[in-house]
Amino acid sequence: MRSEAVQVVVTDVVLDGDLAVPDRAAGVVAFAHGTGSSRHSPRNQAVAADLCRAGFATLLLDLLTVEEDRDESRRFAIDLLAARTTAAVDWLAGVLDLPTGLFGASTGAAAALVAAGQRPEQVRAVVSRGGRPDLAGDALAQVHAPTLFIVGGRDELVLELNRQAAGRLTAPYHLEVIPGATHLFPEPGALERVSPPPPPGAPR
């Protein structure tokens, strides 16, 4: 597997990311980080590592620069986050000839869904973990990719918002509720339920 630090140029900013590509990758998953998060998120890094073990390349990309992240209003600027997620999809198409999926957490889920609607030929699937897909608004109707919503059973408000957002999709979807889990899935075994199982014989 090769891993490298990358930079994605978007309009007038440069976004830092980490790209990991296992041998014979079946696809690539770009992560849209949520409110106050980054490519250094231990939760998303854990999921990315499991995806790599399952044979998928991953791109962990900071959607905001360090300076921008100091402005909390930008963390909820879905149009901005979505535009940068879309730029990441376009960038990946230029460097890897692989099907693309998006994994969004918190506000990043809305950004991922908007990007999926804008790039229907490129984005094959979307996963929302503890996300706020409701913030994608009318863009939900433009999503064609199959979508998986993963929500903690004790994250009651977000669970209801996910149900409402799912009901606005025309694309196939599934809502997976992790019993006993709260918003950030800190409970023992909760985050592992989010990740794909490793191939037979592969270490966890």
Image: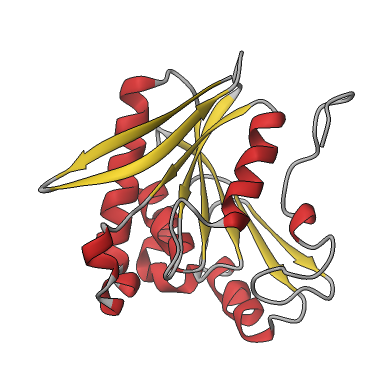
Question: What is the residue that sits farthest to the top in this orientation?
Answer: 24
Regarding residue 2, the answer to whether it shows in the image is yes
| Rendering colour mode | secondary structure
The vertical placement of 30 against 96, above or below, is below
For the point 41% across and 20% down, the residue is 96
Task: Kindly indicate the quadrant of the structure image that contains residue 86.
Answer: top left
Residue 201: x, y in percent? 89, 23
Tell me the quarter of the image containing the C terminus: top right
Residue 123: x, y in percent? 45, 38
Question: What is the residue that sits farthest to the right in this orientation?
Answer: 201
For the point 38% across and 71% down, the residue is 137
Position of residue 194 in the picture relative to residue 127 (left or right): right
Residue 197: x, y in percent? 80, 39
Residue 185: x, y in percent? 71, 68
For the point 33% across and 40% down, the residue is 88
Q: Nearer the viewer, residue 33 or 149?
A: 33
Regarding residue 119, the answer to whether it shows in the image is no
Tell me the quarter of the image containing the N terminus: top right
Task: Kindly indicate the quadrant of the structure image that contains residue 90.
Answer: top left
